[in-house]
Image (spheres, rainbow, N blue to C red):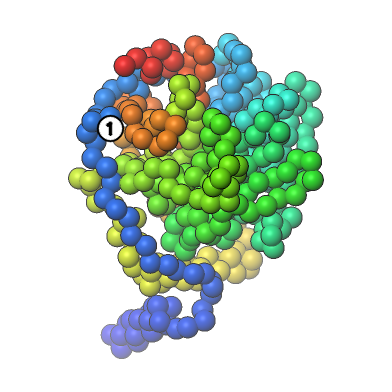
């Protein structure tokens, strides 16, 4: 009994030290923030079942995690969970390349994760790999050129999570660095300890990177405005889209493009009619409890969680050094990703894609009622077909473009 009582006292002492002691790692800034209530699902956001018409494309080989999609005629290009870039045409899947090192069977940290793909004005594919950096790829020859590496500081800070990109008419690249403290294997850390994300411009002529916006809370999707006067970036953990002016009288300034979204935004893409589609990775509804809304007002609690997380990871890493084992590696990876909180496959079934006009006014939405698609990250509108990206689905879904343009 005395031994158990002593154990409880020691445990409480450790936990209190983690909570209150100054100077303990990790040394992040924990800010207080609050979100306004999400918009009601009424009017242009009223529930509908448009996305229930989406169908999976029959493929000749399995795929997993086609997070971002680029269309060229009848061809679709996407990255997969194993770090490979593939072309899909008439159901045939062709591997173009794998960025970074090839993963072995025991790899528990991704060797590559293509999170954003776009064609530049010269027809080369620009790729944001969340593990390895920004690349330019000739999809016809397979030639790969690294533009931004993970070992090159941008204004004194290394990139940790290149997420999405867009390219202007001069070939300059705008990309989101979702976090400067967390990689793709522990993305929830940015939610607790952020904001540290950035919007970056890469000048393809000078080969220099410039930070346009900093202290963004998980900046995600990137989209140039149709007039190329500004660049839009989704701020996932603040449920909004920011706008940064790159030309005109407001050059160098930023404002909110759309706010209080009924979900956490992922990628943003043109809707084909002068406006934009914003994919909500996880719904945030007025009628449901939101842990994010609650956690924002409790920075000390978030600091405690991050300290405890750091302590557990470091302890297991030391044990794994003494007793190398794949099980320990898997546990470390799971805890680094904050367990079930970082499991993208556990996100809600409800899918919402918000449609805005060029000025950020919400004019419509695409939603599901029964399925089949959920956990989406992107929508890419083509002339005949519109495709849906997802970081977890093991199929590529599409819908007739005419089905989403009916009013």
42 left or right, relative to 251: left
Identify which residue is drawn at 44% across, 68% down. Answer: 30
Residue 66 found in image quarter? top right
SS at mark 1?
helix
Residue 382 image offset from top left, x and y in percent: 52, 18
Residue 35 image offset from top left, x and y in percent: 32, 55
Identify which residue is drawn at 73% across, 25% down. Answer: 122
Residue 223 image offset from top left, x and y in percent: 54, 36
Determine which residue is flagged by label 1.
Answer: 45
Residue 174 image offset from top left, x and y in percent: 62, 42
Residue that protrudes farthest toward the front in the picture = 249
Q: Quadrant of the C terminus?
A: top left
Identify which residue is drawn at 79% across, 41% down. Answer: 205
Residue that protrudes farthest toward the left in the picture = 287
Q: Quadrant of the N terminus?
A: bottom left
Residue 139 found in image quarter? top right
Identify which residue is drawn at 63% across, 49% down. Answer: 200
Q: Considering depth in this image, is 240 or 220 the residue closer to the camera?
A: 240
Q: Considering depth in this image, is 380 or 273 the residue closer to the camera?
A: 273
Q: Considering depth in this image, is 234 or 86 the residue closer to the camera?
A: 234
**Residue 343 visible within the image:** no
């Amino acid at each position: 009994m005395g031994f158990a009582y002593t154990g409880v006292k020691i445990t409480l002492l450790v936990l209190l030290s983690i909570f209150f002691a100054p100077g303990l790692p990790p040394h992040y800034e924990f800010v207080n923030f609050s979100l306004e209530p999400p918009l009601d699902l009424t009017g242009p956001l009223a529930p509908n079942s448009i996305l229930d018409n989406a169908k999976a494309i029959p493929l000749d080989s399995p795929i997993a995690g086609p997070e971002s999609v680029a269309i060229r005629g009848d061809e679709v290009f996407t990255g997969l969970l194993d770090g490979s870039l593939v072309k899909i045409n008439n159901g045939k899947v062709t591997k173009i390349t794998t960025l970074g090192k090839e993963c072995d069977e025991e790899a528990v940290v991704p060797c590559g994760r293509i999170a954003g793909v776009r064609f530049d004005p010269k027809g080369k594919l620009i790729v944001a790999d969340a593990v390895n950096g920004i690349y330019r790829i000739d999809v016809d020859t397979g030639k790969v050129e690294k533009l931004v590496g993970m070992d090159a500081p941008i204004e004194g800070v290394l990139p940790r999570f290149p997420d999405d990109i867009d390219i202007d008419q001069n070939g300059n690249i705008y990309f989101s660095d979702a976090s400067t403290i967390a990689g793709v294997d522990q993305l929830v850390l940015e939610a607790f300890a952020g904001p540290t994300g950035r919007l970056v411009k890469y000048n393809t002529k000078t080969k220099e990177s410039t930070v346009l916006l900093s202290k963004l809370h998980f900046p995600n999707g990137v989209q140039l405005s149709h007039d190329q006067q500004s660049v839009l970036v989704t701020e996932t953990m603040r449920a909004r889209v920011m706008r940064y002016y790159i030309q005109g009288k407001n050059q160098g300034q930023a404002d909110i493009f759309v706010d209080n979204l009924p979900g956490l935004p992922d990628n943003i893409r043109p809707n084909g009619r002068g406006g934009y589609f914003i994919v909500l990775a996880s719904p945030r509804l007025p009628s449901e409890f939101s842990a994010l809304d609650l956690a924002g007002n409790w920075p000390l609690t978030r600091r405690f969680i991050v300290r405890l997380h750091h302590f557990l990871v470091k302890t297991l890493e030391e044990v794994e050094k003494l007793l190398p084992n794949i099980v320990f590696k898997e546990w470390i990876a799971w805890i680094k990703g904050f367990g079930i909180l970082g499991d993208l496959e556990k996100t809600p079934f409800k899918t919402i894609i918000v449609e805005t006009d060029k000025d950020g006014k919400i004019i419509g939405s695409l939603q599901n009622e029964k399925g089949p698609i959920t956990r989406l990250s992107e929508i890419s509108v083509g002339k005949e077909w519109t495709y849906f990206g997802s970081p977890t689905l093991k199929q590529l879904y599409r819908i007739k473009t005419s089905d989403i343009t009916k009013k």
